[in-house]
Amino acid sequence: MIEWSESQRMIQKMVRDFVEKEIVPNIDAIEYEGVPPYDILRKLAKTFGLDVMAKMEFDKQIAAAEAAERGEVKEKKERKEGFNAMAAEEAAMRMIPIIEICRHAQGLVTAMGVSIGLTGGAIMSKGTIEQKKRWALDLLTLNKIGAWAISEPNAGSDAFGQMKTVARRDGNGGYVINGSKTWITNGPYADTIVLICKLDEPGVDPKDRKIVSFILDKGMPGLEQSKPFKKMGIGSSPTGELFLNDVHCGPERLMGGSEDGYGRSGAKGTFSTERAGVAAMALGMVERALELSLEYSKTRVQFGKPIGENQLIQLKLAKMEVARVNLQNLVFRYIELMGYGKDMTLAEASAMKLYAAQTCMEVTTEAVQIFGGMGYMREARVEQLMRDSKILQIYAGTDEMQVIAIAKDLLSR
């Protein structure tokens, strides 16, 4: 894949028009004034039929799962070798809205991705049929908002090693959970929360205890959701804390219906799904930073000429274009891989995330530099792109953790 197809460009324009009409006029409200972004996201879903498509896919998966449970195993069709244009098109349709929205409000993609992709996706991947029916569909259609809670005050990159939140068996088949979670996307407003914690196993070293997950609902006794944090960037993605004080959960809330249903591997797998999306997010932000920088370089006059005629500014612009092309090629490669039915290795996915995050930070920083004093002003918007870029180097695994993941995967072969 070397360029967007005509049909993909049409979708791109439709999404861009929606963003200009529905998101751009509300940027200050959702980024700085504390207005929750969910009405805009729901309007996006309805405008493009995302909720209808999610419902159709949900019904299909539930029907297949119920048939398998009854022993009605259908003969699996072997995947044909070669390129599947439909699979590639589906991947492209996922990437295009991410790119277009991130040109103006990266936080919206973060909020939507965590609710649909992480929370809803985790339940669809590891939940029982009953759990999928009870919780997943509302998340996938954005009727309800989801949060995926793993991070704790003392457990960032070492999410499992330093985890203190524990679930204790209550002797009646249920569990009692105590602890806290922080930096939780959608935490202040989430209707449904997938909570990852440790099982309290007497006699077992804390570091070796099982990782278990529960599906919680807003308003459960003992569950407190904080107000949104004030953050450096992505204000349109509400982030907060969760406090759990003797939260009682019946066995129906245990993910997968088993203490082995969604452990370390499930949580790590969910993390991996974020990494390809980061390249698309970075591409949108880099495209916008370059676009704004080019316009300013042509119109800003200093010492009797546009600053774009200065070689130092030209060097910055040239490097921005190199970064844009590289990021676009990473996105195109991901779409091609999906078309061929291939998954990225851990090293590839981590390398993609590492490069995208670092490149986005570098380009948006240079955009502020090109604008000079004006770039430091909110109205120029490049300062927002710069602040929003920083989180790409932190969430879904810091740059440093990506380096470790890449090296370990390569060395294990």
Image: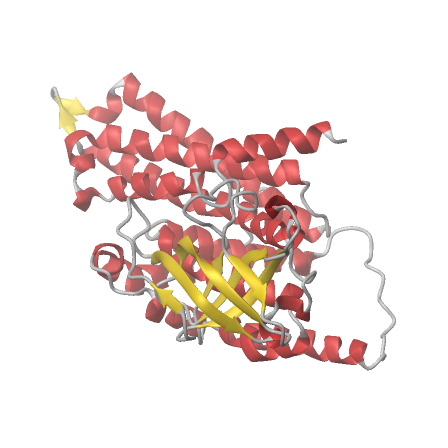
Query: Foreground: 175 or 340?
Result: 175
The single residue placed furthest to the front in the displayed view is 203
Q: Is residue 215 left or right of residue 185?
A: right
Give percent across and percent down for residue 352.
56, 38
- Can you say which quadrant of the picture contains the C terminus? top right
- Can you say which quadrant of the picture contains the N terminus? top right
The single residue placed furthest to the right in the displayed view is 75
Q: Is residue 395 left or right of residue 366?
A: right
The residue depicted at 51 percent of the width and 61 percent of the height is: 195
Residue 121 lies, with reference to residue 249, above or below; the image says above
The residue depicted at 21 percent of the width and 56 percent of the height is: 28
Residue 303 visible in rendering: yes
Residue 41 visible in rendering: no
Residue 191 lies, with reference to residue 184, above or below; the image says below
Q: Is residue 119 left or right of residue 367?
A: right
Give percent across and percent down for residue 113.
48, 58
